Image (cartoon, coloured by chain):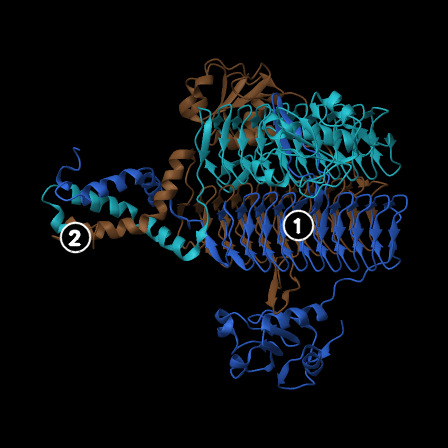
Chain colours: A blue, B cyan, C brown
């Protein structure tokens, strides 16, 4: 992208500019290391100390902080969100190379929009439907009958199993697997019988899915990821899960089969949620917690203990084992006249 | 598959039919949303409420529940297992396309059964042996000298390192990696020295391995997965682990090196098992637990705390830090005549 | 490798040989199952019981243990490290096949050393730079402008996004993804706005990265993995993390964005470290712990509770919920003259 003026940025993104509308920037930078020609943002109060000495040509910040800004200020209600939009404009994704690379393999009856890019060594299954301006990155495998909405990008080495459906403007990172069989097994005399996984996966619009995340197909009905959901890396989502719109889940979380998560939830890293639960809208679960019951009410939930020095922690663990006994000892102490011989009941 | 009669199903799967043997079904459905022409099952007592109004043509259920069934009943000792077998029969996997796709690459001396399918862009290493009716899905990499037993399927983008051996009728999902180096490093003055990982991986018959699961090769001896083991997605299995027959492990669990797990165990999601342990047969470990000692006896084991409201949980964590001190305070209270000045010892 | 004499080994690796310098070995073996012609090592005291009856031609061990060795002894300060070096010499990696496989795809302007191997179906992006004796294994994708140092190997199906830089002598296992977007999202009225991830990933020399591990690119600055870091399988490393030289991290750990980990740390399996923290040099975190505050001091830290029988554990969890109340009851008991009516305050 060519450089742009602050006046153009203010107009395009609806910001108030305090400074020189003709000043030019050509990229974003961190406030503490920014140089002339760059635009930074200030949202985290811990970074305020960098403001006085910033080398940025302009800073995106809120009205309260703007008075202290020694350079051009772009005043935003939500500096982080405005910064994100400006950055995407200044640093656009590489342009697609429309067409099917000669090393890609396309199955019978697949329909591929002329504006889509099917990159090197990608494999498109029979009857798949690939929308306008879609990127199927190198080494990706799109199963038979899968459908990909307009402007969705599969970065590289993504796998969509048969019949999986993706909405528009999604971004799937490398190693993502959508539509593998859910973990359905029935116990029998001699071991396990596989329960065929016959449902699908429906993914809405504007969904981002991080590297090596896996989303299983439904057993009979579908697994559903609603619009605007954001998933970090290495998340596992079981069969027939439904995730409500605009919920964000951090890395390494695992959601077991048939659980429904509401809208606008925030699930921390390494959280585990058991199967067949209902999690309400606007629930926040802090990192590494285990959720084993439904959560019917918005709020913040937690279960993990922060690490401490190992010797001290070992004593706590030892005490945990004696906790039941301690309750009994205290109950004996509470009995009038009784506590003196608590040790020889 | 064409539609079939209930009489055919009863005969083929050894079930008692209460109803019309000429009634026809052509697929499975969930009991609550089933329509005419479909067969549902009832195993979970929570679903019994759907029975009276089911639209299914037939329901697979146990003898006790059959009396309440308003439609054709197929009576089974184990409705879920019988359902699984019926579903697999009604909804067979797509047929293989025997042969090597022109875009696949086959190394010198590899032996591939004529009935096997080597899909687009798959890579077969030198000297690999691929059995009858095997599927090597698109983008999969089979290392030199690896062996795959009859009827085993690698869904897509599976990696087998050199010399890995898979039994018959296994199913490996996309992104699985079998035979990468175990995490063997030796501490030295200036950092770490890699310990070469020279063993193999032996996988038995009827093993299912979920998407993006990894199983490392042995350091000297082999990593062994016995017959009928079922592994969910994103599981990590270290070098020289042995997993006993018919053990099932849920998603995101991690088994450290040189640990042996018995037969018919059930390991919950996100469980971590330390290295060099022995876990007996028929052990159940509940989700997110850490196992740091051997478990010599069958039973159910747990270690995780279910999430609760974050403020309440924070108080619990604070109290944990004071637990040792509380034990001391109670001990002082228990000393006859002593407790009144407990606070000023 | 041809077989070698113990004299050659002693000379090459600086060990003291007690025994026959002309005795020949051709491979390594475990001390308990070793046969003639093999060399074993003894570092773990638990394995000392195998020494008297070992079938190995020679054993690498320390001076203290050497007196009990019934066969040729190679005396080392650090038997495990010396063993690792001997094993690597006796069992070298398969030789590269220099050149670009006809099924590989190379973008415009990529520079590939003549001694490098670009394996079947690999894809090299425009302008990438591939050093001497590099292996880009089958199905790997190297992004535009990425750089790979000499002697580094990408085993198979590795993805490097654009501009990622790898040092020399690294080993990346199958399914590794380096340089996917970090999890950067800004909350807005109607959901989330993606924060473009514009930084890179810099990986030093002698770094090993296990199967299906993911390392995200920086938001603006870079994610940095210093020299000699060893990462096990299925680890997730967020954007702008820095990991100090020679730190080792076990499987399934997750490091959140912008956290700095010091040098020579050892992080256990399934550990979760929150974002924006500083972990000092020489910190050890035991398996499955959650780290939610900075650790400014070397030492051993822990937070997980080992699994116990589920019924007993359920009682502990119940008691945890009552812990706050128990502290209050003990405080009442401690009040002089007050404790007798503790139950009716």
Q: Tell me if residue A305 comes above or below residue C34 in the rendering.
A: below
Q: Secondary structure at mark 2?
A: loop
Location of residue B236 by image quarter: top right
| C61 sits to left or right of C332 | right
Number of the front mark, 1 or 2: 2
- Extreme residue in the left direction: B337
Location of mark 1 (residue): A211
Q: Whole-percent x and y of residue C307?
A: 43, 35
- Is residue C108 among the parts visible in the rendering? no
Picture quarter with the C terminus of chain A: top left
Q: Give the alpha-carbon distance from disc 1 to disc 2, as whole Å.
A: 56 Å
* Residue at (74% x, 63% y) in the render: A93
Circles 1 and 2 in contact, beta carbons < 8 Å: no
Q: Tell me if residue C295 comes above or below residue A123 in the rendering.
A: below
Q: Whole-percent x and y of residue B124?
A: 79, 32
Classed neighbour count for the residue bearing mark 1: other residues with Cα under 10 Å, few (<14), some (14–19), many (≥20): many
Image mark count: 2
Q: Whole-percent x and y of residue B144?
A: 75, 29
State which chain disc 1 sits on: A
Q: Secondary structure at mark 1?
A: loop
| C124 sits to left or right of B339 | right
Q: Nearer the viewer, residue C333 or B257?
A: C333
Classed neighbour count for the residue bearing mark 2: other residues with Cα under 10 Å, few (<14), some (14–19), many (≥20): few
Location of mark 2 (residue): B343
Q: Nearer the viewer, residue C107 or C326?
A: C326
Picture quarter with the N terminus of chain A: bottom right
Q: Are marks 1 and 2 on the same chain?
A: no
Q: Whole-percent x and y of residue A65?
A: 52, 79
State which chain disc 2 sits on: B
């Amino acid at each position: 992208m060519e450089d742009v003026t602050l006046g153009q940025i203010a107009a395009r993104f609806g910001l108030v500019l305090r400074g020189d509308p003709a000043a030019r920037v050509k990229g974003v930078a961190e406030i503490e290391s920014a140089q002339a020609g760059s635009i930074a943002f200030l949202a985290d109060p811990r970074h305020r100390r960098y403001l006085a000495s910033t080398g940025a040509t302009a800073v995106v910040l809120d009205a309260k902080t703007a008075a202290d800004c020694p350079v051009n200020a772009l005043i935003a209600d939500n500096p982080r969100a405005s910064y994100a939009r400006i950055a995407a404009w200044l640093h656009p994704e590489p342009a697609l190379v429309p067409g099917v690379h000669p090393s890609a393999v396309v199955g019978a009856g697949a329909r591929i929009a002329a504006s889509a890019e099917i990159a090197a060594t990608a494999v498109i299954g029979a009857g798949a439907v690939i929308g306008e301006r879609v990127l199927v990155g190198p080494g990706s495998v799109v199963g038979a009958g899968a459908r990909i909405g307009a402007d969705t990008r599969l970065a590289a080495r993504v796998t969509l199993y048969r019949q999986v459906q993706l909405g528009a403007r999604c971004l799937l990172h490398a190693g993502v697997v959508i539509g593998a069989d859910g973990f359905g097994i029935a116990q029998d005399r001699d071991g396990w019988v596989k329960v065929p996984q016959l449902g699908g996966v429906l993914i809405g619009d504007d969904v981002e899915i991080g590297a090596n995340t896996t989303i299983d197909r439904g057993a009979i009905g579908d697994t559903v990821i609603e619009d605007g959901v954001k998933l970090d890396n290495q998340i596992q989502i079981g069969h027939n899960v439904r995730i409500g719109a605009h919920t964000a889940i951090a890395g390494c979380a695992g959601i077991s089969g048939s659980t429904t998560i509401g809208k606008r939830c925030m699930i921390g890293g390494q959280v585990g949620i058991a199967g067949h639960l209902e999690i309400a809208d606007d629930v926040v679960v802090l990192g590494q917690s285990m959720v084993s019951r439904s959560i019917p009410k918005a709020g913040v939930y937690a279960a993990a203990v922060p690490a401490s020095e190992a010797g001290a922690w070992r004593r706590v663990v030892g005490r945990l084992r004696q906790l039941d006994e301690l309750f009994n000892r205290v109950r004996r102490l509470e009995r009038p006249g009784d506590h003196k011989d608590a040790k020889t009941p």
